[in-house]
Image: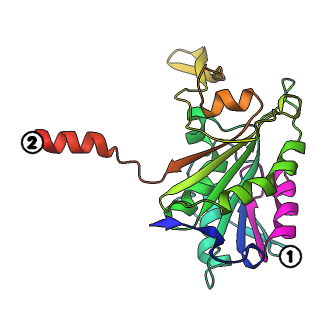
Amino acid sequence: MNIKLSDKPISSFRVLLVNDDGIEAEGLAVLEEFARKTFGDVFVVAPMHERSAQSRSITFRQTFSVKSCGDHRYAVDGTPTDCTLFGLHHVMKDQRPDLVLSGINHGDNAGNSITYSGTFGAAFEAGLHGVPAIAFSQLRNPDRSIEFDVARAYLGKIMDDVLSKTWDHHSVLNVNFPRKDTLSVKGISWVPAQRSSIIGDFKVVENQVGSWVAETVLSFPAPFDQEDDVTVLHRGGVTITPIMTNWTCHSSLKKMMEAV
C-alpha cells in the first residue's frame, strides 16, 4: 500500500505536531507557525520539558500527567512517543490526523543517530499506527547555537515535494536542514542514511570500589565522499530519508529460509 497525500486539499488536513525539545521549544514554534498557516486543523502534543534522546521509549506501568495549554495544545509529562500516543488515542481519537509532523529538533538527526532521536521516535510511532509522519531536525552551528531560517524557507518546499510523490505506507520520512551559512543551491535531496554512530567513547571514573561514574562521549560522524544524509547535509543540502517501520531484513530472511 502506498501513501499519496495529494488525494485531498492540504488546507483540509488534520495535523498532529509533536517533538522532544518540549512545548516551549523554538523549533516547535517554527513548525507550528508553518502548520497553522498551511493546514486545516492543527493539534500540538509535546513534552512539558526537554526529552531528547528518548528514542521510542514510553512511560510504562505508571501514569503521566497532561496539561491543556489552550488552542488545541497539550503539554505531557512524558516521552515524545507518549505524546504521539496521547495525540492519536485521545486528543484526535474521533478523527485521526492525516499527517504527524515531529520537530523541529534542536540539532540534526542524521546517520545512525536517527535511532537515538526522540523526535524521530515520535514520528516512527505514528508510522506504526498507519499515519503518515515526517520528522524534522535542524543542524546546529559550530558554536552549538541554532538558527531556523533554512527550515522556515524550506518547510513549504518539502511539503510540495512530498505531496507530489507516492511513498511506501510502511515508511516515515526523516528530514534534516543544513546551517544557513552552508546552504547550497542543490536544495532538497532524497538520500539514504549514513551507517555511522555518534557514540565515540565513555569517560569512566571509579567512584569507589565496585562503583563508577560514566559519561557518554559523542563523536559526530564525518561526511563521506558519497551521497548520504550526513554528507549532503554538511555540504549544505536539505535531506529527506525514508525509513522503514518494518525492520525485517527480507533478503537475509529469504536466504535463511532457503537454507533450511
Q: How is the image coloured?
A: rainbow
Q: Which numbered disc covers residue 71? A: 1
Looking at the image, which residue sits at the far bottom?
94
Q: Quadrant of residue 143?
A: top right
Residue at the location (58% across, 16% down)? 208
Left/right of residue 163 with respect to residue 130 in the rendered view: right
Looking at the picture, which amino acid does disc 2 mark?
Answer: Val
Mark 2, other Cα within 10 Å: few <14 / some 14–19 / many ≥20: few
Residue 131, image x and y in percent?
Answer: 57, 67
Q: Which numbered disc covers residue 212? A: none
Left/right of residue 48 with respect to residue 168 in the rendered view: right
Residue at the location (60% across, 35% down)? 113
Mark 1, other Cα within 10 Å: few <14 / some 14–19 / many ≥20: few
Residue at the location (63% across, 64% down)? 84
On the image, numbered disc 2 is attached to which residue? 260
**Disc 1 or 2, which lies upstream in sequence?**
1
Quadrant into which the C terminus falls = top left
